[in-house]
Image (cartoon, rainbow, N blue to C red):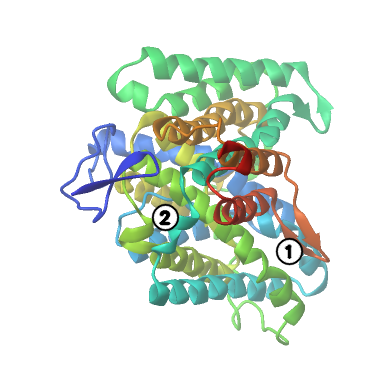
Amino acid sequence: MQSKNRGIFILDTNDKKYRNPDAVIDLYERPPLGSWWLLSLQHLFSMFGATVLVPLLIGLDPGIALFSSGIGTILHILITKGRIPAYMSSSFSFIVPSIALMKTAGYAGVAQGTIAVGIVYLVVALLIAFIGADWIDKALPPIVVGPIIIVIGLSVAGSAADNAMMNNGHYDLKYFIIAMITLFLTVLFNMYFKGFWSNIAILLGIVCGYLISVSFGIVDFSKVISTPWFQLPNFEFPFISYTPKKIYWDAILSFAPIAFVTMAEHLGHIMVLDELTHRNFFKNPGLHRTLAGDGTASIFAGLVGGPPITSYGENIGVMAVNKIFSVYVIVGAAVFAALFGFVGKLSALIQTIPGPVIGGISFVLFGVIASSGLRILVDNKVDFNQKHNLMIASAILVIGIGNAYLKIGTFQFTGIGVATIVGIVLNLLLPKRALSEQ
């Protein structure tokens, strides 16, 4: 049985017998082995830059971030009963407090903060398990969901543009040319190739962009040459690698509130996945399970030496482009990530992918996410002649894309989080029609 919700047909029970007619490979379908590993590598390459950037900024081992992202993703998929194709990896939201803690308490403080984030997720998940998730449909109608998804895609547009243009803080025409070539090649591969080759258009775009970057002389292979083939990541196990001297309450109190920021982003990612896959993950496996999966991934990362974990928009963008939603492909990417944490040269080679290549690919990935939000508004025939809809969408878009964040002390609530809350509150408080329209 199907019901219409948020502009798409969503299966209430998430029945495994249902097949999404828009999918090339649907949620529970396993691709042939020959293409499976390439599709998984495509996901790995798409999220790799952001995954390793977070630990590099904080001062952690990128190999640990890869390993914890892979295992964290597998844990999330197990907890969500193998029903959600979401990839979990390093979160940018915790960079500032993490850098501060590394200078004072060291990783022991970061670890306690990361574990605290996971515990907050688990507590909220437990509460939702008791009260249910029926409130979601009322709080998140199409006029709220559509603009939020647009914001999720466009709020990172500046980052994509910086990668495409900037070389160590300075505009570089060579970078911009590479980014544009990568963008156009990816679009051409997606539009003019058929079958399997069309499905890996993003991977082909990355490979071609990389080869062009080599010809332009902007790829440095020195780290690849100096890195051994196999190396053990610098694991940080509590009471083995280090002994926590105390409970770092400053770490816990600075990390725990930010968990609500990443929860808001998590809700947005689930909305996008609902729209893409024609399912309702809020009801099955349930928001409590998706949050528990996120929380467990962060707790695991804190126990092995990694940063806090969150779901990744880059991987959602890949699925939006190629219409391959298979959980098996995400599991394959997770396995590769965990293994690559131990293969020094492969990890170092992927780290040499230049910024303009990532920027060119991101133009497509983030744009497709934003377009998914626009599709929700169109499919639901949202009437922007109504002031109710116009006011809500306007506030969400400008706050979110402009990143009008809330900052109190060291606590910072991102523009996406603020936009989400403002949209929900306005929708609940405003009448359907203004007095001048009655």
State the residue in front, 194 or 261. Answer: 261
State the residue in front, 186 or 22. Answer: 22
Quadrant for residue 55, please give it.
bottom right
Quadrant housing the C terminus = top right
Q: Position of residue 163 (x, y in %)?
A: 69, 31
Please tell me whether mark 2 sits on a helix, a strand or a loop.
helix
State the residue in front, 156 or 6. Answer: 6
Measuring 33% from the left and 36% from the top, which residue is drawn there?
Answer: 324
Circle 1: residue type: Ser
Measuring 72% from the left and 44% from the top, which residue is drawn there?
Answer: 403
View extreme (front): residue: 438
**Residue indicated by mark 1:** 98
Q: Measured along the vertical axis of the image, is residue 4 above or below residue 308? A: above
Please tell me whether mark 1 sits on a helix, a strand or a loop.
helix
Within 10 angstroms of label 2, few (less than 14), some, or many (20 or more) residues?
A: few
Q: Measured along the vertical axis of the image, is residue 139 above or below residue 404? A: below
Circle 2: residue type: Asp
Q: Position of residue 421 (x, y in %)?
A: 62, 56
**Residue indicated by mark 2:** 137
Q: Position of residue 91 (x, y in %)?
A: 61, 55
Measuring 66% from the left and 26% from the top, which residue is drawn there?
Answer: 356
Q: CA distance from mark 1 to mark 2?
A: 36 Å
